[in-house]
Image (cartoon, rainbow, N blue to C red):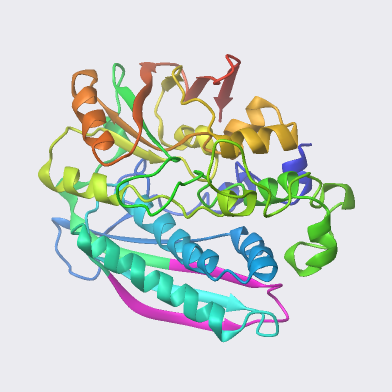
Amino acid sequence: MSEYLRRGVSATKDEVHQAIGRLDKGLYPRSFCKVLPDYLGGDPEWCSLIHADGAGSKSALAYAYWKETGDLQVWRNLAVDAVVMNLDDLICVGCTGPFLLSSAIGRNARLIPGAVLEAIIGGTIDFIDQMHHYGIEVIHGGGETADLGDLVRTIVVDATMTARMRRSDVVSQERIQAGDVVVGLASFGQTVYESEYNGGMGSNGLTSARHDVFSHALAAAYPESYDPSMPAELVYKGRMGLLDRVESTTLNAGRLVLSPTRTYAPLLVPILRERAFDIHGMVHCSGGGQSKTLNFLGPQRVVKNNMFPVPPLFQMIAQCSGSSDEELYRVFNMGHRMEVYLSEDEAPSFIERAESMGIEARCIGYVEDAEAPEVLLTTASGNQVIFRK
């Protein structure tokens, strides 16, 4: 059993998928998000979307960093995580908004004061304003802030987002076909709409990252930041301090891991509105990392043979954890967190448009027919990994 599973976290979420197996998959079973009939508007040419996600256990590391430094910016970044994990998932089905947002915060009021709540809510509002500047309409509909000290060790930051769209505009992976290429959009670097270097973490794999990277001193200083039932030898077993500088970046280790989840909305929403490219599918490589694609394939193989070089954040995680390539690429995005499937002749123009916004992009692979869904991945170090259902 991997250390990841021993910590009580599953990258593949097999038990979750089994539990929801009886649920209807919506109008487009292979779409990235569930697409429902237009229950609110009653228009047969439209459909409805609703999605829930959050910052996950990233909040536990944000808590430790804030206690160590007093830096409230990490909470503002956490607000971005909760919004983007919903926004970019909905964009993967071709939705361009407007998007309605509801926030849900559960806190231990003894440990999380009002100043933290203000930073999270302020960070949400500022991110929404930034998206409006790029023509992306997100409307905050309020939400719930609950004091749950008996249940929540520090704080949980979640959100729900809903929208309507024309069925004719839905992007569903049924259109992915042999011969398509896969354009990966980098999760790291600095886009024209980001204020500093982004490590590329996103909001997945944080349980592994924080315990593998950071030293056991955090366990003694902030025992509320982890599950006390976890095997002791897996708790904060790394060698890095939160404020240690990371080579090749301008950030310390704490801020690098706590980089806000990058949104691709300023690039993708205008493209989708203009129908500038014939996009056959989009996959947000979040939970499940580079194996996420498996959930949306027919009898097809995605060959990922031109991956991004491993950025500094994931180099640090690999060195500290000693994890295999198979586990690293299943848990983490390892350099790109959005995949766009389209024809080979359209890829160069798409890449050029992405790079004009400071998003590094490349053709990371291609699609071919197969007997069953499969991802054949060549890691940056040249090893081959095969993901199957």
Estimate the x, y position of residue 352 in percent, counting from the top left: 22, 30
Residue 11, relative to residue 327: is it above or below? below
* Residue drawn at x 52%, y 49% as measured from the top left: 21
Number of dots carrying numbers: 0
Observer able to see residue 81: yes
* Residue drawn at x 54%, y 29% as measured from the top left: 310
Compared across the picture, whether 84 is left or right of 37 comes to right
Most frequent secondary structure within the magenta stretch: strand
Magenta part of the protein: which range? 139-159
State yes or no: residue 54 in magenta: no
Instruction: Farthest residue to the right: give it.
Output: 232
Between 289 and 174, the one lying in front of the other is 289
Residue 43, relative to residue 33: is it above or below? below
Residue 363, relative to residue 285: is it above or below? above
Between 232 and 312, the one lying in front of the other is 312
State yes or no: residue 140 in magenta: yes
* Residue drawn at x 71%, y 32% as measured from the top left: 319
Estimate the x, y position of residue 311 in percent, counting from the top left: 53, 33
Quadrant position of the N terminus in the picture: top right
* Residue drawn at x 29%, y 51% as measured from the top left: 265
